[in-house]
Image (tube, coloured by chain):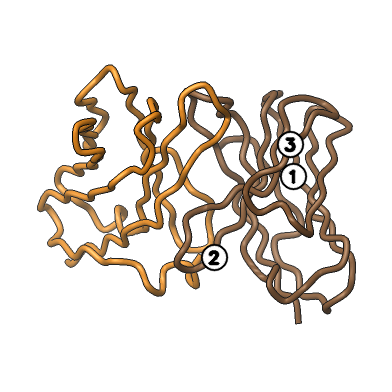
């Protein structure tokens, strides 16, 4: 158990609405990541954090923002959801280079 | 999740046989590699890792082989069991970065 909790686990919402996904960790890891997983693609990095209030963009960051006000929580926000953001979203901790990442069980997000 | 696995290559093996799953990694600057197992509806689970200064590493029933010359990684599972049925994918860490590149995966089906 990597001590990562993602919420909600499932969400259905409409185009144009804001959505926030939460990742909570209990292991005090410095690094946290948000990925999306889609058919035909490996996990793709959206944003990551290397400390409280320290974040950076990944390869598919357009349309997403993040915040990390506490070590244990990393929030992913879709300001105005679009159908192309329908996906399974995973949070990961650890890593930081030369260490394995550990993942939560994901949030399945459907945008209609 | 299930939708991610729809178009994955599939390896079918008899229970008790050995399985070999292959991965071609993309970046010659990568120096750390990980294998993950993902069951339906769950997050990726760390199996084993290897650093670029090694060619082989063994765990419990699993072995990872690294061939840097051809940028190839393999995962061997000994005495495959029904519980090994899942999607397996590799990840690489580009040296000196927080960036991890994930493969799309292979579905392993264990036949009774």
Tag of residue A38: 2
Mark 2 crowdedness (10 Å alpha carbons): few <14, some 14-19, many ≥20: some
Comes first in the chain, label 2 or label 1 = 1
Q: Is residue A91 left or right of residue B45?
A: right
Q: Nearer the viewer, mark 2 or mark 3?
A: 3
Q: Chain of mark 1?
A: A
> Secondary structure under badge 3?
strand
Q: Which residue is mark 3?
A: A56
Closest to the observer, A95 or B78: A95
Q: Are marks 2 and 3 in contact (CB under 8 Å)?
A: no
Q: Chain of mark 3?
A: A
For the residues tagged 2 and 3, is the chain the same?
yes
Chain drawn in brown: A
Count of marks overlaid on the render: 3
Q: Nearer the viewer, mark 2 or mark 1?
A: 2
Comes first in the chain, label 2 or label 3 = 2
Q: Are marks 2 and 1 in contact (CB under 8 Å)?
A: no
For the residues tagged 2 and 1, is the chain the same?
yes
Identify which residue is drawn at 29% across, 53% down: B84
For the residues tagged 1 and 3, is the chain the same?
yes
> Secondary structure under badge 1?
strand
Q: Chain of mark 2?
A: A
Chain drawn in orange: B
Identify which residue is drawn at 23% across, 49% down: B22
Q: Nearer the viewer, mark 1 or mark 3?
A: 3
């Amino acid at each position: 158990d990597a001590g990562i909790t993602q919420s909600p686990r499932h969400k259905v919402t409409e185009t144009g609405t804001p959505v926030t996904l939460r990742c909570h960790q209990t292991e005090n890891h410095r690094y946290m990541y948000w990925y999306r997983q889609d058919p035909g693609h490996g996990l793709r990095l959206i944003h990551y954090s290397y400390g409280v209030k320290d974040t950076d963009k990944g390869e598919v960051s357009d349309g997403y923002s993040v915040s990390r006000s506490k070590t244990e929580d990393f929030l992913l926000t879709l300001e105005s959801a679009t159908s192309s953001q329908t996906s399974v979203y995973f949070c990961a901790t650890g890593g930081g280079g030369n260490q394995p990442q550990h993942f939560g069980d994901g949030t399945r997000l459907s945008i209609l | 999740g299930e939708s991610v696995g729809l178009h994955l290559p599939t390896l079918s093996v008899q229970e008790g046989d050995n399985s070999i799953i292959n991965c071609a990694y993309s970046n010659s600057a990568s120096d750390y590699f990980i294998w993950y197992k993902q069951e339906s509806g769950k997050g990726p689970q760390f199996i084993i890792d290897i650093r670029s200064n090694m060619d082989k590493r063994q765990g419990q029933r699993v072995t990872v082989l690294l061939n840097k010359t051809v940028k190839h990684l393999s995962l061997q599972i000994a005495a495959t069991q029904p519980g090994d049925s899942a999607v397996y994918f590799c990840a690489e860490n580009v040296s000196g970065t927080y960036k991890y590149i994930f493969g799309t995966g292979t579905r392993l089906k264990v036949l009774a």
